[in-house]
Amino acid sequence: MQSACITGSRVIGSFILSIVISINVLAQDNSPFSRYGLGDLVPSSNITNRGMGGLSAAYGDFQTINFVNPASYQNFGMQRAIFDVGLDINNRTLRNNTGGKYSSSNAIIPYLAAGFQIKPQKSKTTWGLVFGLKPLTKVSYNITSGSRFSLNDSIIRTFEGSGGTYQAFMGMGFGIKNFSVGFNTGYRFGSKDYSTKVELFNDTVPNRYTPAIKEIKNNFGGVFAELGLQYRFVLNKKTSLTLGGYGSMQTVMNATREEKYESYFPLASGGIARLDSVSETKNIKGKIEYPSYYGFGFLYDVQNKSKLMLGADVVMYNWASYRYYGAADALQNSWQVKAGAQYIPDITGDIKKGYWSSVMYRAGFNFAKEPYTINGNMNSFGVSIGAGLPIKKYSYAEINRSNIVNMALEFGQRGNNASLLRENYFRLSVGFSLSDIWFIKRKYD
């Protein structure tokens, strides 16, 4: 038998190793949408839920760390420790309304999480503990525009940005009979660095103008709290209906900004040689206000020899209240509707039915009003399919003793042919949900 300290060390060691690896996974990307607010939003749910369109409010099972709604933490299997890590491979194709096209790809680790069932042996209350790290937004863009401002002169502007927002969190979920409540708390932090290069050209006199660059660097952080609730109605011996809700109040983060204005000389290699500093200001203190959000949904469960889950969510985001040093951005309140299903052909563990009968098959879709106010309102939609692949065949009652590979394929679009900018995306996600015994009291030494 494994002791608590040995198993815990393995989980925590794997967690720390994955954090180190995640620093080197990020690759080149270019999303003009990430210029606004704190960047482009990273999908908030885990890969299990993303295969079902992203629904999360009422979802919970033995081996899924559903960190969107912390009330689900009480569902962890008895005496289990779970480590869950994901990998996203993203490809996006951008098109403008003049026929221009650009494609980029990147890979990120969308979350790292560890969960533990810590229910006291004689307690009537179920109790789960989770800690983890996940990105919330990502800033990565490089945009060039050109125009003529006089008969003989033209101007080229280059806008670049990098950074992102992250959330380090710890949460607990408690269940009493059919009701559960949970919370996440921790620290939101990140950076947003952006620059604007301006190059002026005269058609007849070369090197008449000296290019200039403006650089602004931001670092910020603040404490946050999230709350989740779930209630399960038992309709009969085979069916149940779970209602769930979650949300977070607006988070005020302390920020520090640096501003620098310089002239430069462009190099043939593509870099720049700085010539003269026009002005430089450091340690500008301020506040960044991360908006509140809330979601609610349902999950209908039918279980006999097979198991079917059907559900839907509605999520609201108050991005109109976002503030950067007291200033608003080109953002508006947004919403998203998610719906999906999961089906397991056989939950009895019958070996005669084969491995594929115990696989969890998933599908879903989502539709949203985006927070960006570029050329008016912008909508988006996506469809997804996914699967949960147990390492070996188990009955559903024992699946919390298994290791599972979760996969999801997502396709979607933001904007339409009338938009100034339209994005088509494809995302392949793979997650590893690894389970082990957390603590067994020894009867003999």
Image (cartoon, helix red, strand yellow):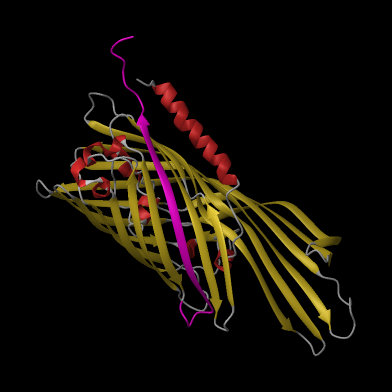
Q: Position of residue 108 (x, y in %)?
A: 53, 52
331 is within the stretch colored magenta:
no
Screen quadrant of the C terminus: top left
User: Which of 203/262 is in front?
Assistant: 203
Above or below 54: residue 100: below
Q: Image quadrant of residue 35?
A: bottom right
The magenta-colored residue range is 416-445
Q: Residue furthest bottom?
A: 151
Screen quadrant of the N terminus: top left
- How many numbered circles does the render carry? 0
Q: Residue 204: in sight, yes or no?
A: yes
Q: Residue furthest left?
A: 236
Q: Residue at x 57, y 82 (%)?
A: 99
Above or below 377: residue 141: above
Q: Residue at x 38, y 49 (%)?
A: 406
Q: Position of residue 203 (x, y in %)?
A: 84, 85
Q: Image quadrant of residue 73?
A: top left
User: Which of 437/339 is in front?
Assistant: 437
User: Which of 223/28 is in front?
Assistant: 28
Q: Residue at x 44, y 41 (%)?
A: 113
On screen, residue 74 versus residue 420, left or right, reads: left
420 is within the stretch colored magenta:
yes
Q: Position of residue 173 (x, y in %)?
A: 33, 39
Q: Residue 276: in sight, yes or no?
A: no
User: Which of 72/303 is in front?
Assistant: 303
On screen, residue 218 versus residue 311, left or right, reads: right
Q: Residue at x 21, y 30 (%)?
A: 124
